Image (cartoon, helix red, strand yellow):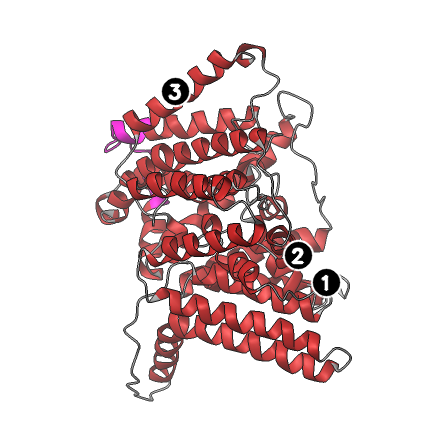
Amino acid sequence: MLFNSFTFMIFLPVVFLLYWFVFKKLRWQNLLILVASYVFYGWWDWRFLILIVITSLSSFASGLLIRRYEGNRRVQRCVSASNIVLNLGILAAFKYFNFFVGSLQTLLSAAGIAVDWPTLNIILPVGISFYTFQALSYSIDVYARRIEPTRDVVAFFSFISFFPQLVAGPIERATNLLPQMLQARRFDYCQAVDGLRQMLWGFFKKLVIADGCAEVVNQMWNGVSSSTGLMLFVCSLLFTFQIYADFSGYSDIAIGCAKLFGIKLTTNFKVPYFSRNVREFWRRWHITLMGWFTQYVYFPLGGSRCSRSRTVLNTIIVFALSGLWHGADWTFVLWGLYHALLFIPLIVLGSQRHRDTVAHGRLLPTWREFASMVVTFLLINFGWILFRAPDFASFSEFVSRLFSPSLFNYHGLTMKMATMLAWCAALLVVEWIQRERQHVLQIDGYRLLATRPARLALYAFIVFLIFYFAGKVQTFIYFQF
């Protein structure tokens, strides 16, 4: 079921009313969440539910077994490792089998060995990477004694399948979301209103910015050979904003939706395009994924508590895996390695870690901050070309035409391109003003919006913009991951 569908507009109010006015006890609320989540997920294909049930059962059982064999670390290690192998095996079979087989065939063919191995003709289950990583966090955290295993199977299954963030995150760790499933929740009017505001802003970013940009971007990628360098540069800019508005828009809708049910999800984006270097960008972009890799891959490898060369190697491994997580194609792996290449000089030079928001307490950044943001943005923008390319040949053609004399040729630019660039610029301005807040529509404290009619007028205006300017409906980009 899509957030941006008429079905969801009926589904959400029904679940909300049942949740607070019919199923008032915690266990019944969790059961409702579980049923609603399975309906939400099974709306694409009911067969996908089999996999999420297997993942949930194996992870739940692993927690109980680890608890049962408390004091026997060898058995606990085997139980945790078995659960990890099972879930990663499912993920590999459905997402990576054809990729690995195809890559090995290509390698052997280059060596003069002809092979013809079969591939799997299967559909990639929506959001499998997200809920698999969420389930793995539980098993690993129980083994590491960061969290106590639960015996409440309904609460646990609800934790794995919580529908707002099930198919595209945020990727919640068990230490954050599971305890919320185990404690009573009370309706908070202010929290619910804030959730609706955040959902509204998420819908605006998705339907107006992301889907509008997608129309231009898809058309341009289908006609790279006939496009000028300037047209392709505009295309790259629009995709940079498309993927941000699409993914952060989903996260805003998910986080806002969860607030309606008294549940707080982890912030997944913090104005990443205002980053002063790539290190800061990855502290602000898809925060929960990078946090997962940091906790469960980077730190076990030694993190930065080892030699500088080993730290660099650990960083390369994390970014390569991050790229592979995004998709079963070498373009994604190379995209990850590209970011590792940008990250390594910051490690070697010991650059500033920028834990504050840029221009904190000021209206405008300094010239140095502005320059560093522009350079970082352009580097990130170039990486998104590789991310979007269907294959390396297409990427090479795109880049060769981009960096050609036609980069200064205005022929071919359309009004649609100009319109979407204006929307992207407006998005940047609004998010700059609200960069210290969790989302743009946290408008408390503004005198012009102090009265209820003024706020309602603002919300009505945004709804009007959505209905008037919304592009052709597109699925969320990260559903394919």
Tell me which corner region of the image, top left, top right, bottom left or bottom right, holds residue 246. top left
For marks 3 and 1, the one nearer the N-term is 1
Q: Assign a secondary structure to mark 3.
A: helix
Q: Residue at x 72, y 68 (%)?
A: 144
Asked if residue 227 can be seen in this view, the reply is yes
Q: Against 70, is 480 above or below?
A: above
Asked if residue 405 can be seen in this view, the reply is no
Counting from the top left corner in percent of width and height, residue 25 is at: 56, 48
For marks 3 and 2, the one nearer the N-term is 2
Q: Residue at x 23, y 33 (%)?
A: 412
Q: Against 404, is 84 above or below?
A: below
- Which residue is label 1 attached to? 146
Q: Against 414, is 58 above or below?
A: below
Q: Residue at x 48, y 44 (%)?
A: 19
- Which residue is label 3 attached to? 460
Tell me which corner region of the image, top left, top right, bottom left or bottom right, holds residue 210. top left
Q: Assign a secondary structure to mark 2.
A: helix
Counting from the top left corner in percent of width and height, residue 227 is at: 25, 42
Q: Nearer the viewer, residue 11 or 404?
A: 11
Q: Nearer the viewer, residue 432 or 437?
A: 437
Quarter the C terminus occupies: bottom left
